[in-house]
Amino acid sequence: MLVLSAVLIVADDRFERLEPLRSGIASALAPVFWLGNAPDRFGDWFAGVVTPREDLLSENEALKARLMILERRALKYGALAAENNRLRELMNASGALDDRVVVAEVVGVSPDPFSHEVIINKGARDGLEAGQAILDSNGLMGQVLYTAAFTSRVLLISDSSHAVPVEVLRNGLRAILLGNGDIGQLELVHVPDTADIREGDVLVSSGLGGRFPKGYPVAEVSHITKDPGAPFVTIHATPMARLSRSKLVLVVFSEAGAAGTEELYDQQEAGSMAPDAGPETGGETN
């Protein structure tokens, strides 16, 4: 056998007569060799594409943590964008006012459910005094009730002890707008059933009583009820200001607000804000 193998090797090397036979045998055995190496090739491929379970779990936790960070950033940026929009609205509103104003932030709310009061982060050190009007970007919110060095307590127009002398923007009809303890609703009182007032009419501060400067948006008439035989109509109005949502407010510095300071103290101590209703209404407020 060895001799035969040697002869074949010599013959193949010198005469190349066995090349066709060798090529044929190699071609016939190629699939066998390929199948024989298949397990090794599959193992190499599988190891390259399949990640161990521990690695997958670790990667999953890392992705979750990254997602939480991105979500928190998105919320933060969203809050900043919303605050910037509120500041922009407030600055636009202050630009339309003739009086000097200071921007303040609502930092607290009265825990008493029967008292509609908020705390702002400006006080006597900032020049604030009781009686000053407080607005947001949409309209009148209330007025400063008491001041401390760095904070002030604000009575909202929805408080049941609060009253605002107003007039109908459309025709100048004057009336008194009372708070009734409902944050989203005010009541216009002592309006004769013959008065020219309609749903949708805008009510602005009249300036009577020396408490609020004239012309600030206060409310919009939302519903009118006429009782046959009654001399007055029942009128409800929706506050223009976002009383329960506004975070940033304007404190107005004007002679009207300063003039009403002493009266404000007296009325709050007496438990009623209505005495400055003004002589033109001809009625009492409680």
Image: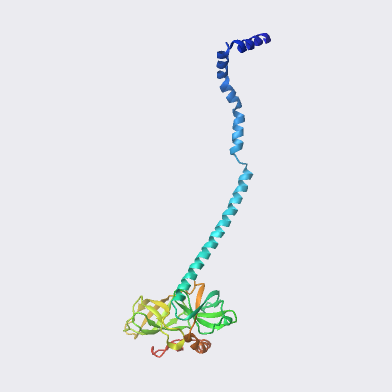
Q: Position of residue 10 (x, y in %)?
A: 64, 11
Side of 65 relative to 100 (left or right): right
Q: Position of residue 30 (x, y in %)?
A: 57, 21
Query: Which residue is drawn at the image coordinates 37% and 76% (left, top)?
Result: 223
| Total tally of numbered discs in the picture | 0
Q: Position of residue 128 (x, y in %)?
A: 54, 82
Outermost front residue: 14
Query: Which residue is drawn at the image coordinates 59% and 34% (left, top)?
Result: 45
Q: Quadrant of the N terminus?
A: top right
Q: Is 89 in front, or is 57?
A: 89
Q: Position of residue 188 (x, y in %)?
A: 40, 82
Colour pattern: rainbow
| Relative to 15, residue 62 above or below | below
Query: Which residue is drawn at the image coordinates 50% and 64% (left, top)?
Result: 81
Side of 229 relative to 156 (left or right): left
**Residue 119: quarter of image:** bottom right
Q: Is 94 in front, or is 182?
A: 94
Q: Is 115 in front, or is 205?
A: 205
Q: Quadrant of the C terminus?
A: bottom left
Outermost right residue: 2
